[in-house]
């Protein structure tokens, strides 16, 4: 599959270009940036043959099968609609858009055009999260009572730009990390949060946007989910716990971009470590995307998964702003 990158981004450089090229016949043929000079420099650095600042020109290239959108968040909507209009399959970064309505429009446009549209929620691609989901599905912890998601990290210095000071670009920890946690809860528990009650604040990095959030979500089954996201916690570590009537799962160090961490299952029989595959998270997502384009299965996270994770995240921000419990509005 031949890809065009829309956005000369860090995530593309660090994870996605390699994942695209690792597929059979995978090539990155173009990069589009807001600046032609930056696009050319990025293309040179990463061995990409085509570069420029003209999105329409890149999308008119018949060689391009699919685009990967990893620009800042406010640009995703227009760029995705343009790519779909040009007949390209779309792998879009989270959050899909700045509003649920815009995200729904993107996903519907791809459906109407018969194109694959996926959201780059990498965590559900990890062996660790899939192993936790299998334990739950197999009934190893009985009826799920609650989950706790610990995702308070320290934003690396090279990413302390628009994320911490540009609300208009979609900055803030809620669009950045709460969306991932919403997807994790939906993936693991197989149901969609109904209501959220949240608090947010700035604890050292956020300038006009929140850098920390804590929230509690109710699920249709009656289970509750507690989520904590931050940019400012150097030593907190990450993890998730799922507690049921027959057991608890503790997954430590698994809210990450790499296939690391450890999982322990605790039941009345005692404690047991749970092994899991260590494939690359982003590679798995790209593999499933390429398969979906070939008519085999669906992407790891569909467009609708991206709509729903955004809906939960925006409900968290709304609740934190108003102090009220908010019913999640899934839009479409
Ligand atoms: P970056 O800040 O690295 O890139 C975003 C945009 O900022 C780029 O498209 C580029 O614009 C501009 N930019 C980046 N570096 C420079 C620079 N040195 N000088 C000038 N402009 C620059 O963001 P990320 O890669 O961290 O995030 C991009 C998207 O990917 C976001 O939507 C984010 O939410 C998502 N993301 C998803 C992850 C996941 O695991 N799914 C992980 C990390 C990010 P231009 O293209 O116009 O040059």
Image (cartoon, rainbow, N blue to C red):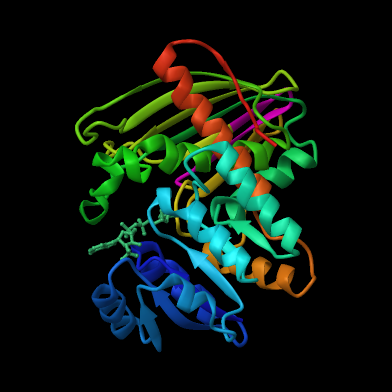
Above or below residue 246? Residue 278 is below
Residue 71 in the image, given as x and y percentages of width and height: 40, 59
**Residue sitting at x 69%, y 35%:** 189
* Residue 136 horizontal side relative to residue 104, left or right: right
Taking the image as shown, residue 311 lies to the left or right of residue 48, namely right
Quadrant in the rendering for residue 146: top right
Span highlighted in magenta in the image: 242-253
89 part of magenta stretch? no
Can residue 130 be spotted in the picture?
Answer: no
Question: In the image, residue 48 lies at what x, y percent?
Answer: 39, 85
The number of numbered badges drawn on the structure is 0
- Give the image quarter of residue 70: bottom left
Ligand 1 falls in quadrant = bottom left
Can you give x and y, in whole percent of width and height, for residue 132 in the image? 65, 44
Which quadrant does the C terminus fall into?
A: top right
Comparing 312 with 254, the one in front is 312
Q: Residue furthest top?
A: 324
Q: Residue visible at 48% across and 72% down?
A: 56
Quarter holding the N terminus is bottom right
Residue placed at 53% from the left, 26% from the top?
315
**Residue located at (37% from left, 53% from top):** 72
In the figure, 224 relative to 167: above or below?
A: above
């Amino acid at each position: 599959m031949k890809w065009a990158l829309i956005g000369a981004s860090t995530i593309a450089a660090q994870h996605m270009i390699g994942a695209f090229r690792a597929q059979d016949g995978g090539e990155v043929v173009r990069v589009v940036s807001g600046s032609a000079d930056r696009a050319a420099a990025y293309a040179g650095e990463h061995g990409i043959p085509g570069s420029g600042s003209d999105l329409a020109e890149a999308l008119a290239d018949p060689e391009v099968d699919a685009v990967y959108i990893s620009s800042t968040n406010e640009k995703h909507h227009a760029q995705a609609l343009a790519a779909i209009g040009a007949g390209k399959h779309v792998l879009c970064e989270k959050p899909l858009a700045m509003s649920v309505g815009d995200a729904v429009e993107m996903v519907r446009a791809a459906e109407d055009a018969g194109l694959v549209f996926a959201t780059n929620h990498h965590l559900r691609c990890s062996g660790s999260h899939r192993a936790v989901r299998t334990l739950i599905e197999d009934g190893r912890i009985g009826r799920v009572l609650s989950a706790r998601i610990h995702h308070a990290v320290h934003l690396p210095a090279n990413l302390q730009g628009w994320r911490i000071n540009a609300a208009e670009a979609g900055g803030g920890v809620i669009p950045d990390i709460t969306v991932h946690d919403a997807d994790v809860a939906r993936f693991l528990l197989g149901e969609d949060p109904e209501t959220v009650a949240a608090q947010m604040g700035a604890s050292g990095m956020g300038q006009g946007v929140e850098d920390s959030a804590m929230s509690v979500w109710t699920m249709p089954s009656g289970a509750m989910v507690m989520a904590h996201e931050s940019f400012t916690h150097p030593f907190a570590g990450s993890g998730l716990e799922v507690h049921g009537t027959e057991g608890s799962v503790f997954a430590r160090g698994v809210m990450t971009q790499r296939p690391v961490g450890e999982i322990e299952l605790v039941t009345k029989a005692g404690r047991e470590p749970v092994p899991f595959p260590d494939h690359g998270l982003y590679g798995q997502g790209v593999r499933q995307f390429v398969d979906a384009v070939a008519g085999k299965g669906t992407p790891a996270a569909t467009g609708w998964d991206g709509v729903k994770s955004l809906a939960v995240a925006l409900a968290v921000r709304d609740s934190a702003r108003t102090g009220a419990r908010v019913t999640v509005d899934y839009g479409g």
